[in-house]
Image (cartoon, rainbow, N blue to C red):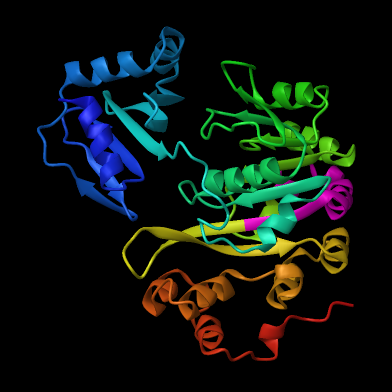
Amino acid sequence: MNFDALLLGAKKVRASDIHLMEDQAPFFRINGDLKKVEIPPINHKEIHEILHRMMPHHLLRELESQRGCDFSYQLGNDLRFRCVAYYSMGKLGIVMRLIPMKIPTIEELQLPDVLKTIARNPRGMILLTGMTGSGKSTTLAAMLDYVNEIEASRIITIEDPIEYVYVNKKSVISQREVGKDVPDFNVALRQAMRMDPDIILVGEMRDCETIRVAIKAAETGHLVMSTLHTTSAVHTVQRIIGYFPENEHDLLREQLSLNLKASITQRLVKRADGTGRIAAMEIMVVNSTIAKLIRENRIPDIFSVIKGRDDGMRTFDQALADLVRDNIITFDEGAAYCEDFFAYKRFVAGIMSTGDKGAIIA
């Protein structure tokens, strides 16, 4: 098998992911759908040769001991991938996600302009959330590179592995990879706070200790950007608090009310013209009303405030309706992903019920 040709072919057909499995033909994910590549199955020898080509010895040892391993791989100056090697029923598999060499802009991704305002927060915490494969890393990269274009900031990224590679523009950027440059996120975050940062990007907040240090960084005047695998702003706030013992919940709510600046939850939906996918986003900007709801543990009421669309906020169904009205996605595509079909249908028609306008929170 010509491995380089396979990777270049994935780029040519605009695949987002490549799936390689021992004794099976490869698959590409194109516009969200898996497509079989019509070549012979990859045999045991070939997949081992591929792994030895892509992975240094210490990662090969990790794969054998942990039965799974994350890493990045670059083919010349053309292609970069975020990879996972794993075992399934005793056989090897690899998933490779294509990472553009050029970081796309907010405009190129057709994301809401409010993301620029959010990215320019001088301090606090900004969270990008969504399921695996929803484009969180790409949105974060676009926001961070926007800051890089316009501000002289000291930016430190902590990633596992490094995905997008930044070029210093107005900002000075250091990228640190967990396992290569630093042992774990928690240690890296503590070290980053002593490296004169303005902005710290944490690839993922995986445990309460990392979240605790991230909140401390936000409290001490830094802007922290990170991701979580949550499906809404309400779920995000609840998940963060739920990481901690119950006797700390009051403190966590107070800290989040003061330091959380925005939560952006996204899902990828297919474009109507068949050229790929676009992010539909629920956007919560923490204004004084939402901060009060967090402090008072009235977290489910946050959704009503988001519906009011103040400060650039929108629910996921409102975001889908906006994309339909702009002829970017079809009505049926939005209907397949919406959370409340009748509300979504009203938003597409431009009809707002009293409940859709958002509650006035006392």
Q: 79 above or below 191?
A: below
Displayed quadrant of residue 173: top right
Question: In the image, 67: left or right of 39?
Answer: right
Q: Is residue 19 visible?
A: yes
Q: Residue furthest top?
A: 57
Question: In the image, 329: left or right of 295?
Answer: left
Count up the numbered dots.
Answer: 0
Q: Nearer the viewer, residue 325 or 268?
A: 325
Q: 287 above or below 14?
A: below
> In the rendering, at what x and y percent does residue 279 appear?
50, 60
Q: Per the image, is 244 magenta? A: yes
Q: Residue at x 27, y 33 (%)?
A: 7
Question: In the image, 46: left or right of 216?
Answer: left
> In the rendering, at what x and y percent does residue 197 appear?
80, 30
Q: Nearer the viewer, residue 199 or 284?
A: 199
Q: Nearer the viewer, residue 360 or 299?
A: 360
Q: Quadrant of the C terminus?
A: bottom right
Q: Is residue 244 visible?
A: no
SS assignment for the magenta stretch, majority: helix
Displayed quadrant of residue 149: top right
Q: Residue at x 85, y 69 (%)?
A: 289
Residues in magenta?
240-264
Q: Quadrant of the N terminus?
A: top left
> In the rendering, at what x and y percent does residue 245 appear?
79, 41
Q: Residue at x 61, y 46 (%)?
A: 140
